[in-house]
Each structure stands twice: as C-alpha cells, then as structure tokens.
C-alpha cells in the first residue's frame, strides 16, 4: 500500500496577477511561504519514504519549506505544470482576447483544447499515468510526498476518478498548498482526501 500526499505549490506573484505560468515561474508570495510553513507543521509527525517535486522553482521552494531537513529530495519533470505555449506569462484577460477559441476550449471543452507549442490535457494525463505506474512498480509501500501544480493535480484526480476528458474540470482547481491523498493498493487507486486546506486554519506564528 502506497499513500501519495500530493501538494499544490504555494501562492505566487503571478497567481495573484492571474497570469498563466505553465513552464515559466514566479516567486512565492508572503502568503505562499506562510501557507507552506503551516503545512510543514501539519505534517511534522508524518514520516515520508520519499519526497518528489516538480523541477519548477515555485514547487521546489514549497517542497523545501514543507520538508526543510530533507537531504534526498528528488525532482521529476512529469510533475511539471501543463506547458501553455504562447500563453505563458500572459494574463487571463490577454489570453481571452488574443486566443478566444482556444481559451473557450481550455475551460469549456478540454477534449478539444489545442495550444500550438504547448501540451494538451491528454499529454498531461499521459505523463501523470506514466508516473503513477512507475510508483506502483518501484515502491513496495509507504508514504510519498509530492509537490506539483494545479492542472497536474487535476490530471491525477481525473485518472483516479476515471473521468472522461470532457469532465477534466469537474472539480475546482485546488488552492495553494492544498493536500490531496491518493492510496495505491494492489492495483486499486483510491482518493482519500481531495484538496484539503485544513492546515490553513492553524494559527500563524511567523
């Protein structure tokens, strides 16, 4: 039995600006840092056999804040955010006006979404499925902490819930540092916790 603790990175400056990041990056905000520290405290007594982060700076920084004493943290490009091609670095409003058809497909018809120079949702789900299968092959059991991104987490959820691609957005995108727990057990994949932010109710001392 393997428990995957899947965390979205903390809030970033581009999140606040409603600017699409994709494979580009921006720094964590003060709130993003504080929220990661709250999750650190929340998980302080939970032992992990492995910690894996997306290579993106916002995810890796979040992972180091959650597990500051981890000496063998790994990165895996399969955990990176969806590549958004020419959209990256643009605000939602800019994309809506420059790419109206593609923007509509992105949110309302994900099975039809195509972004020249970027990834489709199928591309993201394919690499996430590959990651899951490797975890199932390589781990005999235990707990794995993963820090990744909003769309990537939606891909994990779609796979575990066995949703069709047109239902990709059936759940809202998780908040920064939200925690999702998936259990892999003898070929079964079970969603135990979805996008919990219970740790954000902890009183901050920072």
Image (cartoon, rainbow, N blue to C red):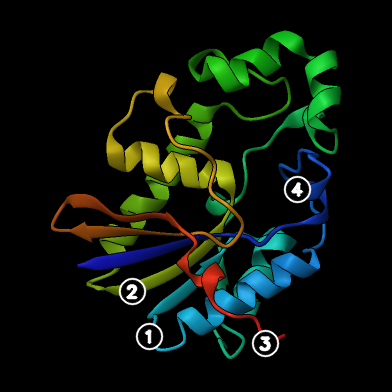
The secondary structure type at the circle numbered 4 is: helix
Identify the mark nearer the N-term, 4 or 3.
4
Do callouts 4 and 1 mark residues in contact (Cβ within 8 Å)?
A: no
Write the residue at 23% across / 52% down.
Answer: 190
The secondary structure type at the circle numbered 1 is: loop
Looking at the rendered image, the disc whose residue lies closer to the viewer, 4 or 1, is 4
Task: Determine which quarter of the picture holds residue 142.
Answer: bottom left
Alpha carbon distance from label 3 to label 1 = 23 Å
Residue 15: mark: 4
Identify the mark nearer the N-term, 2 or 4.
4
Looking at the rendered image, the disc whose residue lies closer to the viewer, 4 or 3, is 3
Task: From the viewer's perspective, tell me whether residue 189 is left or right of residue 113.
Answer: left
Alpha carbon distance from label 4 to label 1 = 30 Å
Q: Nearer the viewer, residue 122 or 137?
A: 122
Do callouts 4 and 3 mark residues in contact (Cβ within 8 Å)?
A: no
Do callouts 3 and 2 mark residues in contact (Cβ within 8 Å)?
A: no
Residue holding disc 2? 143
Alpha carbon distance from label 2 to label 1 = 7 Å
Task: From the viewer's perspective, tell me whether residue 77 is left or right of residue 167.
Answer: right
Identify the mark nearer the N-term, 4 or 1.
4
Do callouts 3 and 1 mark residues in contact (Cβ within 8 Å)?
A: no
Residue holding disc 3? 205
The secondary structure type at the circle numbered 2 is: strand
Task: From the viewer's perspective, tell me whether residue 81 is left or right of residue 167.
Answer: right
Alpha carbon distance from label 4 to label 3 = 24 Å
Residue 150: x, y in percent?
57, 46
């Amino acid at each position: 039995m393997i428990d995957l603790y899947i965390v979205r990175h903390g809030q970033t400056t581009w999140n606040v600006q409603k600017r699409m990041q994709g494979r580009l990056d921006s720094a964590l905000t003060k709130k993003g840092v504080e929220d990661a520290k709250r999750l650190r405290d929340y998980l302080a007594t939970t032992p992990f056999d492995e910690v894996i982060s997306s290579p993106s700076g916002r995810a890796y920084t979040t992972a180091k804040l959650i597990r500051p004493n981890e000496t063998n943290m790994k990165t895996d490009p399969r955990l990176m955010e969806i590549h958004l091609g020419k959209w990256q670095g643009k605000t939602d409003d800019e994309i809506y006006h420059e790419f109206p058809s593609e923007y509509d497909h992105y949110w309302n018809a994900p099975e039809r979404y195509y972004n020249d120079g970027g990834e489709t949702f199928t591309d993201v789900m394919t690499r996430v499925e590959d990651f899951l299968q490797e975890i199932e092959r390589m781990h005999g059991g235990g707990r794995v902490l993963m820090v990744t991104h909003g769309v990537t987490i939606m891909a994990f959820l779609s796979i575990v819930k066995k949703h069709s691609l047109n239902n990709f957005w059936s759940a809202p995108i998780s908040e920064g540092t939200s925690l999702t727990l998936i259990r892999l057990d003898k070929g079964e994949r079970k969603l135990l916790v979805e996008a919990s932010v219970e740790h954000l109710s902890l009183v901050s001392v920072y």
